[in-house]
Image (cartoon, grey):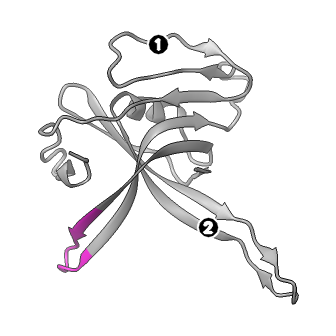
Amino acid sequence: MIGNVGKDPDVRYYGADQAIATLRLATTEKGYTLQNGTKVPDRTDWHTLIFYRRLAKVVEQYVHKGDKIYIDGRLQYRNYDDKKGIQHIATEIIVDNLELLTPRSSSQSTQQAVSLSQTETSQTTPSQTSTQQAISSSQTMPEDSLANVDGQDYSKIIPF
């Protein structure tokens, strides 16, 4: 999926320096004109993205509102009740891979490729590429690590 980041990521830390990041991604289907002349306007959809651990830290550092990114991951459905007791269903994308498509300004470092894995223990050294930053990560969470962080129960949004 390719889209534009709607606002800066929301990153929270828990446990032993572990992170979870969420952000909203806008994807737009371009409008078109039917054969009879009817114009169909652009349609924008908003998606909630969830990043874990080291990938969440990378998102915190490099992803900002307005950036164009490519992601792939898996869908997760979650049920929750609001304050009025109404049940809602949320669809979220648990991100496994991320590529930053927005070119960085010359004041920042030149384009780099970074490959990250949640299971790696050593820091990966950046290497030069053409015009994209690529970041990959496998996302697995320990079952008991997110019980009631910052007053919120993250266990409902974490796949176990």
**Position in image of residue 124 (x %, y %):** 46, 13
Can you tell which quarter of the image residue 137 is in? top left
Q: Is residue 7 left or right of residue 42?
A: left
Q: Residue at x 58, y 28 (%)?
A: 134
**Position in image of residue 72 (x %, y %):** 51, 44
Q: Residue at x 18, y 49 (%)?
A: 155
Vertical arrangement, residue 116 with respect to residue 14, above or below: above
**Position in image of residue 113 (x %, y %):** 60, 21
Task: Tell me the distance, in whole angstroms, between the alpha carbons under discs 2 and 1.
Answer: 36 Å
Quarter of the image with the C terminus in it: top left
Can you tell which quarter of the image residue 68 is in? top right
Q: What label does residue 44 carry, if any?
A: 2
Task: In this rendered view, identify the residue nearer to me: 119 or 6.
Answer: 119
* Residue 132 belongs to magenta span: no
Q: The disc labelled 1 sits on which kind of residue? A: Thr
Vertical arrangement, residue 2 with respect to residue 52, above or below: below
Residue assigned mark 1: 124
Q: Residue at x 67, y 29 (%)?
A: 132
* Residue extent of the magenta highlight: 78-87
**Comes first in the chain, label 2 or label 1:** 2
Q: The disc labelled 2 sits on which kind of residue? A: Thr
Q: For the residue labelled by badge 1, is the local secondary structure a helix, a strand or a loop?
A: loop
